[in-house]
Every structure is written in C-alpha cells, then in structure tokens.
Amino acid sequence: MKTGLMLGLGESPAEIEAVLHDCARVGVDAVTVGQYLQPDTSCLLVERYVTPEEFAELEALGAAMRLRLIAAPFVRSSYRAGELLTAVRWTHPNETTRRPRETAETTRNREPLRDCSETTARVPRA
C-alpha cells in the first residue's frame, strides 16, 4: 500500500509525525512527501516552503518507523512509483506485517473506486 502527502498548507510537525505513525500502524508500505505548489490562482496559496533539511528529517523519521519514505520538494505521488513499488515488493523492511497480494478472488466483492477528481477543493481568493 502506498500513499502521499503534500506539505506547505499549514500543517504542524506534530501533525505530519502523527500521519506517518498512522501510516506505519495500518501497514502502509511506502510514502511520498512533497511540497504543495499552487497550480493556479484559484487554488489554495502555499503557506510555507519546506526546507530540504526538513525533507531529510522526514526521510529519517520514516526509516525509523520502517516506512519507505521519499521526501523532497518536487516529489509527487507518482514520483518513481515503479521503482518504489518494486523495492517494497522485494525488500519490504518489515515482512511480518506484509499483507498477502490481492488477487481477483480477494477483490471481487470490493466496491469500485470512485473518481474524486471533481471533488478537489478549490478555494476562491478574496
């Protein structure tokens, strides 16, 4: 399982750490962490830019939690996704928490994923 975070929207270090702890607790294998960049003027403003040192600290924190964490300003959820997925599958740091791979049999009764692309929050500027 893989997830991603975008930073720079007012989150606190404690909130980031809590999310990473939650990821580790529920068995997330890999996390990407990047800088939020305002796509256009109708989107949320960047509240702050995260320093390269902070990204390095987050990678160290992720490693301590046994997460495969890639953190840098221009990292996005798809950043090196294939390489990351391969690394997680073959060298997962905590094999005892690894869930078995899903098959068509195990996913047959699962609800289909919804397209949430139209629900992205857009906050108009004042």
Image: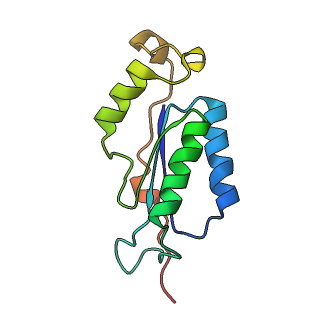
Residue 6 visible in this rendered orientation of the protein: no
Residue 14, quarter of the rendered image: bottom right
> For this rendering, which residue is in front, 30 or 112?
30
Query: Is 37 situated left or right of 15 in this image?
Result: left
> For this rendering, which residue is in front, 110 or 80?
80
Q: How many marks?
A: 0
Judged from this view, the residue extending furthest toward the bottom is: 126
> For this rendering, which residue is in front, 16 or 101?
16
Residue 41 visible in this rendered orientation of the protein: yes
Q: Residue at x 44, y 50 (%)?
A: 116
Q: What percent of the width, then of the height, locates residue 15?
A: 67, 57
Q: Residue at x 48, y 67 (%)?
A: 51
* For residue 118, above or below residue 102: below
* For residue 121, above or below residue 66: below
Q: What percent of the width, then of the height, locates residue 43?
A: 43, 74
Q: What percent of the width, then of the height, locates residue 3?
A: 48, 42
Query: Is 27 situated left or right of 15 in this image?
Result: left
Colouring convention used in this rendered image of the protein: rainbow
Residue 81, quarter of the rendered image: top left
Query: Is 81 situated left or right of 53 in this image?
Result: left
Q: Residue at x 51, y 47 (%)?
A: 59
Q: Residue at x 34, y 76 (%)?
A: 40
